[in-house]
């Protein structure tokens, strides 16, 4: 998952982003890859390593599914903008459209503009789940000197609120369904289904396009932005750290969440896809490459957006320090308006949203793959051969649950989901993973598993990180997140208490399986409480790779001969002869040995 660098504080944000990648993401991703590759199982059955806490696996799947519901809506916004990028006059550049509001606020077209001082409020949606260009930005607008009593907004802001989202006044007024957005959402979900319905083999081929394509476009944006007049203004600002911001706890909490959403530890994705690796794969190399490539992509995205903003500053004379847009305003307001300074604007807007769509889809279908793989592995006997049907059910369910978010009040609901669905739970899941594997299962066993797979043990630095550095970093960040918690808001709109209560119910929904499953396991296990704990804290007989991987000499009959020769049609051999005298395919040793 690549969403880029963070909102509102880009220069200071680079430092905590790097720290969390090196000391947080890389160790966790490496550990999750070991868990998935060694067990050859998904996010739920991997917790056979510690049956008492198998509820963490269920919680991970729930959290990932909740994330996929509202992230699909964000991608459908991108498709909506992509379609409108082909209009002869970009609809977010003018104020004479049917959706523009002139009575309650002043609409300022994109040309000859200066900062209006309007704010979009505290909003975390695209701080977590938009494209790689999530860095600080603003639009260029002019001061309307003769109107001071009315709120001022740009044509791009009004297009987003009153055309794309058709927003109502609050969550209590959901309004009617936004049919164009619903159509875009259906198209995105269909595309995701086509990418994964045949399983991981098809997914592996699809990612060549969905990953490499946007990186090619990123390179094009990078070159185009670098040669713009004034680009050096934005790049210099981007690379000059504002060290005073590092004293703010908020920036560290947001950096942690950004890394988790971008790289994906705690969501079960690394465990799921590592389970498809060869048993001897070098997962340490993969973990380092994944995290460094994600960091490089976000860092490069910062160069792209700030080179364009430097050009806007050069052309308009606006101080780049005045560019303070964040949240949804970054991807759907700031960049579309900045692209108007890149002729032809339709081309650059279309390329931007085309790249955003495929980056979004590349992040979305792994979410569905995590859910499908976890359920399929947990109930393998009942769901054997039904991957396509299960995938269809999961995606259709996500689509139906997302419909309220494409209504007039859907954005308020989406913000509530984004605020509570993963902010706390994913960090808790990752922290539990670290503590269980380091102190319950044991570092020595993890090291032995790694040697069994690759012939090499775990480096000492990773052992220290798993036992001390990374758990401490996550615990402190989680503590600061809770300590500095503020309820969600949007501009002047404040969520009511029952809205906030609903949000906490959403947060508890993914965490509830942990205590519920602990109680269930202790109840079902015989013995005293101490004996029950001792049994359920140890790996059960299902933990570890399948027998044919542990002993590659032995091949199950159904894999050697096919299902038609198994079951009631067992292979008959002539038992009147000794094994040494039985020739050809009748020799039992041939039937079981390579």
Image (spheres, rainbow, N blue to C red):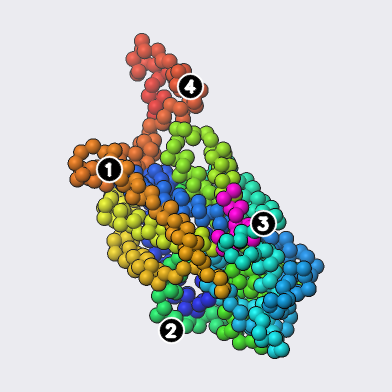
Which type of secondary structure does the marked residue at label 4 adopt? helix
Q: For the residues carrying marks 2 and 1, which lies nearer the camera in this image?
A: 1
Q: Earlier in the sequence, mark 1 or mark 4?
A: 1
Spot occupied by residue 437 in the image (x, y as percentages of width and height): 31, 53
Q: Considering only order in the chain, which callout, 4 or 3, is on the residue closer to the N terminus?
A: 3
Q: Position of residue 8 (x, y in %)?
A: 53, 76
Judge whether residue 283 can be spotted in this image. no
Q: Which residue is mark 3?
A: 176
- Residue 498, numbered label: none
For disc 3, the neighbor class at 10 Å (few under 14, some 14 to 19, many from 20) is: some
Q: CA distance from mark 3 to mark 4?
A: 58 Å
Q: Label 2 to label 3, Cα distance in Å?
A: 46 Å
Q: Which residue is mark 1?
A: 522
Answer whether labels 4 and 2 touch (C-beta < 8 Å): no
Q: Whole-percent x and y of residue 70? A: 56, 57
The circle drawn on residue 565 is 4
**124 part of magenta stretch:** no
Q: Residues within 10 Å of mark 4 (few under 14, many from 20)?
A: some
Magenta span main SS:
helix
> What secondary structure is found at the residue carrying circle 1?
helix
Q: Quickly name the residue at label 2.
A: 244
Q: Is there a contact, CB below 8 Å, between mark 3 and mark 4?
A: no
Q: Give the mark toward the camera: 3 or 4.
A: 3
Tell me the element at label 2: helix
* Pointers 2 and 1 in contact (C-beta within 8 Å): no
Q: Quadrant of residue 507?
A: bottom left
**Mark 1 or mark 3, earlier in chain:** 3
Residue farthest to the top?
A: 576
What residue range appears in magenta? 400-413
Q: Quadrant of the C terminus?
A: top left
């Amino acid at each position: 998952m690549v969403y880029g660098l963070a909102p509102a504080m880009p220069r200071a944000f680079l430092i905590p982003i790097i720290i969390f990648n090196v000391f947080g993401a890389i160790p966790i991703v490496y550990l999750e890859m070991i868990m998935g590759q060694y067990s050859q199982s998904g996010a739920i059955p991997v917790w056979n390593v510690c049956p008492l806490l198998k509820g963490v696996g269920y919680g991970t799947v729930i959290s990932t599914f909740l994330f996929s519901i509202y992230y699909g809506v964000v991608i459908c916004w991108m498709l909506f903008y992509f379609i409108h990028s082909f209009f002869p006059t970009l609809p977010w550049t003018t104020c004479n459209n049917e959706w523009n509001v002139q009575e309650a606020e002043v609409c300022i077209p994109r040309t000859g503009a200066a900062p209006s001082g309007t704010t979009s409020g505290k909003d975390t949606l695209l701080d977590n789940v938009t494209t790689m260009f999530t860095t600080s930005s603003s639009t260029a607008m002019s001061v309307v000197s003769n109107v001071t009593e009315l709120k001022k907004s740009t044509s791009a802001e009004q297009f987003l609120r009153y055309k794309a989202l058709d927003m109502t006044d609050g969550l209590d007024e959901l309004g009617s369904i936004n049919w164009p957005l619903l159509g875009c959402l259906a198209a995105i979900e269909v595309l995701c289904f086509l990418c994964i319905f045949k399983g991981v083999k098809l997914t592996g081929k699809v990612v060549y396009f969905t990953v490499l394509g946007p990186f090619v476009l990123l390179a094009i944006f990078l070159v185009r932005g670098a040669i713009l007049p004034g680009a050096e203004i934005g790049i210099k600002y981007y690379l000059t750290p504002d060290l005073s911001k590092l004293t703010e706890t908020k920036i560290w909490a947001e950096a942690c969440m950004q890394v988790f959403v971008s790289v994906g530890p705690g969501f079960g994705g690394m465990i799921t896809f590592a389970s498809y690796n060869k048993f001897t794969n070098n997962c340490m190399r993969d973990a380092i490459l994944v995290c460094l490539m994600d960091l490089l992509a976000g860092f490069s995205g910062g160069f792209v957006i700030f080179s364009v903003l430097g050009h806007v500053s050069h052309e308009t004379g606006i101080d780049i320090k005045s560019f303070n847009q964040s949240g949804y305003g970054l991807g759907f307001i700031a960049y579309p308006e900045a692209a108007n300074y890149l002729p032809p604007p339709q081309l650059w807007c279309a390329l931007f949203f085309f790249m955003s769509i495929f980056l979004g889809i590349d992040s979305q279908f792994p979410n569905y793959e995590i859910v499908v793989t976890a359920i399929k592995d947990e109930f393998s006997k009942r769901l054997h051969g039904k991957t396509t049907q299960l995938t269809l059910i999961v995606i259709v369910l996500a689509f139906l649950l997302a419909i309220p978010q494409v209504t007039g009040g859907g954005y308020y609901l989406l913000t509530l989901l984004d605020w509570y669905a993963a902010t706390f739970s994913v960090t808790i899941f990752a922290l539990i993973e670290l503590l269980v594997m380091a102190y319950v299962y044991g570092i020595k066993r993890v090291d032995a598993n790694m040697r069994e797979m690759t012939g090499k043990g775990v480096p000492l630095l990773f052992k220290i990180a798993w036992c001390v550095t990374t758990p401490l970093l996550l615990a402190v960040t989680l503590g600061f997140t809770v300590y500095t918690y503020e309820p969600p808001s949007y501009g002047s709109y404040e969520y009511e208490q029952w809205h906030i209560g609903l949000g906490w119910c959403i947060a508890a929904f993914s965490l509830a399986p942990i205590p519920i499953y602990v109680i269930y396991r202790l109840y079902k296990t015989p013995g005293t409480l101490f004996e029950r704990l001792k049994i359920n804290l140890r790996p059960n007989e299902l933990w570890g790779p399948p027998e044919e991987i542990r002993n590659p000499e032995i091949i199950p009959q159904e894999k050697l001969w096919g299902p038609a020769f198994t079951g009631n049609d067992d292979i008959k051999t002539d038992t009147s002869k000794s094994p040494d005298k039985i020739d050809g395919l009748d020799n039992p040793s041939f039937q079981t040995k390579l």
